[in-house]
Amino acid sequence: MALMKIVEFPDPRLRTVAQPVTVFDAELAKLVADMFETMYEAPGIGLAATQVDVHRQLLVVDVSEDKNQPLVLVNPRVVERSGTQVCQEGCLSVPGIFADVERAERIRVEAQDAKGAAQVIEADGLLAVCIQHEMDHLAGKLFVDYLSPLKRELVRKKLAKQRRNAA
Amino acid sequence: MSATAADPGARLRAEAARALARIVFDGVSLRSAFDARAARNADPRDRALLSATLFESTRWWLRFDAALAGMLERPLPSKAREVRALLVLALVQVEVMAMPSYAVVAACVDAVRLLGQPGLAGLANAVLRRWLREREARLAALDADTTTQAAHPRWIVDALRADWPEAWRGMIEANNHAAALTLRVNRRRSTREALLERLVADGVGATAHGDLDDAIVLDASTDVSRLPGFAEGHFSVQDGAAQRVATLLGVADGQRVLDACAAPGGKTAHLLERASLEVVALDADAGRLPRLRENLARLGLSAQVRQGDAAAPAAWWDGRPFDRILVDAPCSATGIIRRQPDVKLHRRASDIRVLATTQRRLLDALWPLLVPGGRMLYTTCSVLRTENEAVVAGFAAAHADARTIALPDGLGEAAGGGRQNLPGSGGMDGFFYALVEKAH
């Protein structure tokens, strides 16, 4: 297993639209393992392949406190959504920035697992938020896109400053 | 997504508020509302906090919802009902659960956002801070009336006062305290001494009940399915008041016994643990029978489990009479408010007459199924005379071959032809017993 580098906003690679996964082989299994390791290490509760510069429709999540409920979604598709909830979100690609985003309260997702088997996930609360957040990445979208242009500009400046200070 | 997105304290409170709103506004039972949310909280500490919060908030809803109303210029709109539940829950966490107010306020204001009502975060903050400033005067105002002091609806206060003019205050007090968890040893698989030893060795505080042969009282609530011996069927959870039933029915090996309202099977199992019997375990609700079967299987017991309406025996009775019949009738559950505080919110005064009619119908319908010289035990977890002694008196008057048997003083207050254990008395639930014998 290996830690992967997480691409950070405003890197244009985060705008890439991911392609469907068609081959479920050992290489995919290794990618999934590496993504989990990278997510847990961050620490994060969700990670999309886009964030590690792999542009395939794959994401991993684990919203449990004990980090013992890993979930892999390959080629996910939201087939039902209902209600709304507002959650303060943060993103491993936009470190240190948190903002309220409105999402569906409940979703039903059809996807495959790492071996290609079909699965259906009913999610609400934080899990629903997290899956929607990661699915946005696969479409080249970021949670900061939901903010007003003014706020997004503030985020960009704040991140640039953080990087300068870290350098 | 990064891990710190939502503070876990806020998330848990938002979840609790959603569940509480289902209980209070949709009439969903506390148990099923909790079960629906518990599955998502793997951490046992989160689950314990969720459970305690839901129990106390349901128990004290009428007090702290009134407190909230007193601080709002106009009621919250119905679409903000989860925020209303959240604010009541916050007051309960501060006042009843003695949680630090700064932590509760901060987490609850965040939780308002998680509930999708960011526009109300400011109001939530203002209301909770106002409570902390004015709490003493506001508590005193709530204490001026029994309904808001003791968080009981007016009709229950009135009914208890009318039925128990001496004891009603103590009953209301007992209703507002969480009940101890009581186990019943399966004497076919273990002994009380052996189980106590295993529990103590496992670090579980437990003592033998003074008056009941099979009962062990735990010092603190816990997830019983994790206790040693549970999977092997060494014990069940059952309040002491219900454990008296098997003794009172006076069963002996070889008898044929009907448990007419059996689910989830606690009393059925106890009867089978005490004697070798042919038991028919009947329940009207088919949905509750799997649980009954599961319980019997875990304890290594067997009964004839049937779905059927006890008031219509033609549909399920094979014509062979019973030596003993237990009628643990559907009731208002006003004797177990300490365990099911949602009774305060879900029951209506008008339910009582309807229940009493059903209860009487059960006794009348089952009486012919009893052998001459046989005994029928009528029990409820109600404390209302309309459901208890009035039902038995009406039944006895209508059946010349029915004779009520005097029950020992130790079972509680004399109540017509039966005995009433008052809630909390002997550490047990409120429970009514009446034993009727059929003439030869």
Image (spheres, coloured by chain):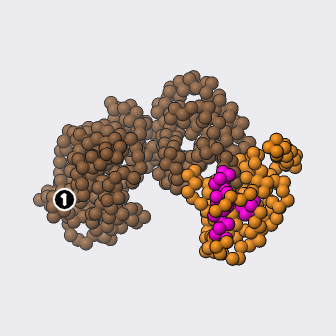
Chain colours: A orange, B brown
Question: Picture coordinates of residue B196 (x, y %)?
Answer: 27, 46
Residue B423 vertical position relative to residue B251 in the rendered view, above or below: above
The secondary structure that dominates the magenta segment is helix
How many marks overall? 1
Magenta extent? A28-52
Nearer the observer, A45 or B215: A45
Question: Picture coordinates of residue B141 (x, y %)?
Answer: 55, 25
* Magenta region includes residue B14: no
Q: Secondary structure at mark 1?
A: loop
Position of residue A117 in the picture relative to residue B265 (left or right)? right
Location of residue A19 by image quarter:
bottom right
State the residue position of label 1.
B275
Q: Chain of mark 1?
A: B
Residue B380 in view? no
Question: Picture coordinates of residue B61 (x, y %)?
Answer: 53, 39
Question: Picture coordinates of residue B263 (x, y %)?
Answer: 35, 59
Position of residue A84 in the picture relative to residue B292 (left or right)? right
| Residue positioned 59% across, 48% down in the render | B15
- The residue most toward the left is B440
* Magenta region includes residue A47: yes
Residue B15 in view? yes
| Residue positioned 20% across, 56% down in the render | B274
Tag 1: residue type? Ala
In what quadrant of the picture does the C terminus of chain B appear? Answer: bottom left
